[in-house]
Structure formats: structure tokens, C-alpha cells
Image (cartoon, helix red, strand yellow):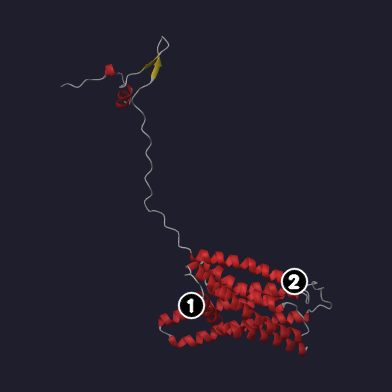
């Protein structure tokens, strides 16, 4: 029992430290790589191309951060007796695609990019639970732990931004440091607690006999490349939609409705004659009918007196 508690604490600490170390400098490294890629471009990049380059830089940096997280976790799992194949690669891919894809989706939908860790937690939980299903019973608990633990960073960052803005507006600048510390404590405490709960569950439900592993690691690698192949075009499309100019507003004064075509009043009609020929009616018949809506006879009209 004591050794299991030690392994649970080690797994939670590895999750927090493995994410805390690269997370603090990830955005800085992403901006630096973005600047290097832009300067290496041969032609001048458009707004959409600059956004795509920035997403690719974030994807590379967060893939490295996910690899560091997966490496720290896999050492803790090995000490507990779990040999999970492909943990580092799957974790790196899930962190990069989940976080960068969630940011691109949030920007395209007009939401706050600070809520991106929620999507990363769901993607990372799905990827790691897929690997744990062979070793433990009830790997869905680890999925829930990842979704809540990593996802709490989103509401914490949103709360920090709103509270920071309110403190600056009211002039309470002395609260800024406490707001930052509180947000960070919420983030890392929630992650450590959820990882401890999920780790305690999976270490207590290890299978007596692991499910047979696939004969080759190639399907797992192909699956990761397939996810990247689907995620990259989707992020490019979302970036293009976010950078596209807004549609033109509709004209406030719509064009006037077309007036109906006037009815022909000349030429009258044609009536058959007793001889079989067609005789055209007088040309002033239409004018008389138009001036007299009651249909009175011309003889009954009163002539004006001059």
C-alpha cells in the first residue's frame, strides 16, 4: 500500500513538473521560431500564410513540450510496473495537436483562446487512455482525469485575465501579484489532484494479463501521421477563415422595385369581318376606355361648352 502511494505521488509530480518546465517558456520559443521561419521565407507572406507559419511553430514547440511530459510520465509508470509502448510519441502528438488545434478553433469561432487547454486535456486523455486500455481496467477514468486536470488551466487563465483587467481599471495594482499566484496555484493544484486520483485508480486496476500487443509499431505510427494529416489542413482552413476579410455589409437602401410594364393602348384589337378578313379596331378606342373607367358610351358624354 505504501509503495503504491509513492508511485501515485511520483506520477502526479512527474505530470506537473513535466508540463510546468516547458509550459513556462513554450510561447516564447514559439514566437522565436515563428520569427526565424518568417525571415527564412523567400517571398513576402500574406496574412493567412503568416498565421499558418505561426501555427506550425506552435505545433513544433508544443510537440517538444509534450515529449518532455510523456518522458517524465513514462519513467513514473515504469517504476510502478507498467510498460506502456508508444507513450512518449502519443503524448507529444496529443499535446501539440490538441492545444494548437483548440487555439485555432477558438479563434475561428470567436471564442477566447485561453480555453484551449480544455481541448488539449480531452485529446491527451483520449490518446493516453487508448494506450492504457491494454494494461489496466477502466482506462476511461484516466481520460476524465486528464480532461479535468489539464482543462482547469483554461478557466484559471480566463479568471486571471478578467480579474487582472478589473484590478487595473479600479487602480488596485497591489492585487496583481496575488492574482497571478492564485491562478497558477489553481492550475497546478487541480492537475496534481486529478493525476493523483487517476493514477491511484489505474495502479489499483492493473490487469493480471495484458492484452496482446500489435505485432508491429507501424500501425501506431501510421495512426499518428493520419491524425497530423487531418489536423494540419483543418488548422490551415481555420486560420484562413480567421484571417479572411469580413463580408461587405448589405446596402441600407435596397434597389427600387421594378414597375410593371405599361399595357399597350394603341392598336386596339382585331375583329373578323363577314368576308373573312381581319379589321383592326380604331386606334383611339384604348384611350377612350382608359379615360372613362365606367365604360360609358361616347354619345352619352357631355361636351364642354366653349
Q: Is residue 227 left or right of residue 206?
A: left
The residue nearer to you, when weighing 52 against 7, is 52
* The C terminus: image quadrant: top left
Q: Is residue 273 left or right of residue 297?
A: right
What kind of element bears circle 2?
helix
Question: Residue 42 at x, y = what percent?
Answer: 50, 71
The disc, 2 or 1, on the residue closer to the chain's N-terminal end is: 1
* The N terminus: image quadrant: bottom right
**Residue topped by disc 2:** 218
Outermost residue, front side: 42
* Pointer 2 local density, CA inside 10 Å: few below 14, some 14–19, many at least 20: few
Question: Residue 248 at x, y = what percent?
Answer: 42, 58
* Pointer 1 local density, CA inside 10 Å: few below 14, some 14–19, many at least 20: few
**Residue topped by disc 1:** 162
Question: Residue 140 at x, y = what percent?
Answer: 72, 73
Q: Is residue 56 visible?
A: yes
Q: Is residue 147 visible?
A: no
Is the residue 77 above or below the residue 211 in the image?
below
Residue located at (67% from left, 86% from top) = 14
The residue nearer to you, when weighing 228 against 22, is 228
Outermost residue, right side: 209
Amino acid at each position: 500500500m505504501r509503495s503504491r502511494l509513492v508511485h501515485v505521488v511520483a506520477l502526479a509530480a512527474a505530470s506537473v513538473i513535466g508540463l510546468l518546465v516547458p509550459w513556462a517558456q513554450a510561447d516564447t520559443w514559439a514566437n522565436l521560431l515563428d520569427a526565424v521561419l518568417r525571415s527564412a521565407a523567400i517571398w513576402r507572406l500574406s496574412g493567412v500564410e503568416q498565421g499558418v507559419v505561426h501555427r506550425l511553430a506552435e505545433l513544433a514547440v508544443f510537440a517538444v513540450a509534450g515529449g518532455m511530459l510523456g518522458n517524465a510520465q513514462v519513467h513514473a509508470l515504469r517504476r510502478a510496473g507498467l510498460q506502456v509502448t508508444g507513450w512518449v510519441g502519443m503524448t507529444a502528438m496529443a499535446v501539440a495537436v490538441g492545444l494548437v488545434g483548440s487555439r485555432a478553433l477558438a479563434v475561428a469561432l470567436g471564442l477566447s483562446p485561453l480555453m484551449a487547454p480544455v481541448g488539449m486535456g480531452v485529446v491527451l486523455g483520449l490518446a493516453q487512455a487508448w494506450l492504457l486500455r491494454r494494461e489496466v481496467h477502466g482506462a476511461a477514468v484516466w481520460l476524465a482525469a486528464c480532461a479535468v486536470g489539464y482543462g482547469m488551466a483554461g478557466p484559471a487563465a480566463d479568471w486571471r485575465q478578467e480579474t487582472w483587467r478589473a484590478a487595473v481599471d479600479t487602480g488596485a495594482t497591489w492585487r496583481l501579484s496575488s492574482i497571478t499566484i492564485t491562478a497558477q496555484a489553481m492550475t497546478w493544484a487541480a492537475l496534481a489532484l486529478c493525476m493523483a486520483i487517476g493514477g491511484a485508480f489505474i495502479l489499483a486496476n492493473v490487469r493480471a494479463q495484458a492484452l496482446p500487443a500489435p505485432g508491429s509499431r507501424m500501425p501506431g505510427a501510421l495512426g499518428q501521421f493520419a491524425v497530423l494529416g487531418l489536423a494540419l489542413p483543418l488548422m490551415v482552413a481555420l486560420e484562413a477563415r480567421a484571417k479572411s476579410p469580413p463580408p461587405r455589409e448589405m446596402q441600407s437602401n435596397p434597389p427600387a422595385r421594378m414597375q410593371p410594364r405599361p399595357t399597350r393602348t394603341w392598336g386596339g384589337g382585331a375583329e373578323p369581318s363577314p368576308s373573312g378578313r381581319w379589321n383592326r379596331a380604331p386606334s383611339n378606342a384604348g384611350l377612350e376606355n382608359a379615360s372613362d373607367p365606367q365604360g360609358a358610351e361616347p354619345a352619352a358624354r357631355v361636351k364642354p361648352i366653349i
